[in-house]
Image (tube, helix red, strand yellow):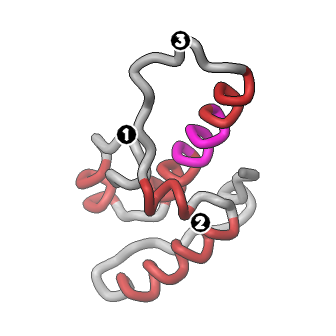
Amino acid sequence: MEIVTSNVSLPRLMKVNSENWNIQMKALLESQDGWEAVQKGFVEPTTIAGYIAAQNKTLKEIRLKDKAALYMLFRAVNESGFENIVSATTSKEA
């Protein structure tokens, strides 16, 4: 996923725009191939012993998508929203 957040201003979640924010964030995350990570969630495996190279590559890609989506969500909320999600470790949790 190529992160566009440095080039694009993210919609900011506020009390009065939650429906529009949801639509915009979903579209943004879909455009960055990160919506699936938010929707399905990501669970870090307890061990990767025995993984073949292709499995390691897939895990790395999924992890990157989830962390990029989490970062976008962190940036797209106001301070009180951030306080609510700061302990999230996955985009779905946020």
- Per the image, label 3 sits on a secondary structure element best described as loop
Q: Nearer the viewer, residue 76 or 28?
A: 28
On screen, residue 48 versus residue 64, left or right, reads left
**Alpha carbons under labels 3 and 1: distance apart:** 23 Å
Region in magenta? 60-67
Label 2: how many residues lie within 10 Å, few (<14), some (14-19) or many (20+)? many
Could you classify mark 3 by the number of other residues whose Cα lies within 10 Å: few (under 14), some (14-19), or many (20 or more)? few
Up the image or down, 1 lies above or below 17; here it is above
Residue to which mark 3 is pinned: 49
Main SS of residues in magenta: helix
- Amino acid found under the numbered disc labelled 2: Leu
In this view, 86 is above or below 57: below
Task: Say whether disc 3 or disc 1 marks the residue closer to the N-terminus.
Answer: 3
* Placement of the C terminus among the 4 image quadrants: bottom left
**Position of residue 18 measured from the top left corner of the image (x, y, whole percent):** 36, 82
Residue position marked by numbered label 2 in the rendering: 29
In percent of width and height, residue 53 lies at 73, 21
Mark 1 or 2, nearer chain start: 2
At which x and y percent is residue 12? 46, 72
Q: CA distance from mark 3 to mark 2?
A: 31 Å
Q: CA distance from mark 1 to mark 2?
A: 17 Å
Q: In the orientation shown, which residue stands out farthest toward the top?
A: 49
At 54% from the left edge and 60% from the top edge, which residue is drawn? 36
Q: Is residue 74 left or right of residue 10?
A: left
Kind of residue indicated by mark 3 = Ala
Residue at the image position 28 percent from the left and 81 percent from the top: 15
Q: Secondary structure under badge 2?
A: helix
Q: Nearer the viewer, residue 91 or 4?
A: 91
- Secondary structure category for the residue under label 1: loop
For the point 65% across and 29% down, the residue is 55
